[in-house]
Amino acid sequence: MGSPIVDQLAFSDFVLAGSFDRHLRRNRSLYRSRRDALLAALSRYLPGLVVEGVAAGLHLVVRLPPGMDEAGVVQAAAARSVGVYRMGEHRFPGSSGTPALVLGYGGLSNGAIDEGIARLREVVPSNMDS
């Protein structure tokens, strides 16, 4: 049930040669730029959203106004070619919480991030006081 031996050996060589450290340094900067682009776009287009989980991972969470339907927002965003995810999918079954979206940024360019949040603004009210 473990990883294949060949994969383990290849990764070991990757680490021992210093390539893994270079890979992490290069990508840390790239992902920080993408995260910052997402935060800037949210501030510009949807300044009322509360943003959480910025310090780790390749995604963040934005709280929606109380009573807003996560599934409806996800569906309306998808109709505009914007992929966002319901926070409700990541909660324990039967639990509730503030409506929120999970926004990933790892595989997007800064321009695509800006365009996506501009389109998301068409779905989420801009006069949010959450």
Image (cartoon, helix red, strand yellow):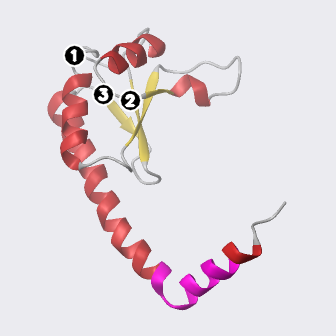
The C terminus lies in quadrant: top left
Whether pointer 2 and pointer 1 mark residues with C-beta atoms closer than 8 Å, the reply is no
Is label 3 in a helix, a strand or a loop?
A: loop
Q: Which residue is mark 2?
A: 83
Q: Which residue is mark 1?
A: 122
Q: Residues within 10 Å of mark 3 (few under 14, many from 20)?
A: many
Q: Residues within 10 Å of mark 2 (few under 14, many from 20)?
A: some
**Residue 10 located within the stretch drawn in magenta:** yes
Can you tell which quarter of the image residue 48 is in? top left
Query: For the residues carrying marks 2 and 3, which lies nearer the camera in this image?
Result: 2
Q: Choose between 101 and 10: the one closer to the eye.
A: 10
Is label 1 in a helix, a strand or a loop?
A: loop
Report the side of 2 relative to 17 (left or right): right
Q: Which residues are magenta?
A: 8-20
Write the residue at 84% across / 60% down: 1
Write the residue at 34% across / 31% down: 50
Compute the Cα span from label 2 to label 3: 17 Å
> Is 115 drawn above or below residue 123 in the view shown?
below
Report the side of 9 relative to 54 (left or right): right
Q: Which residue is mark 3?
A: 49
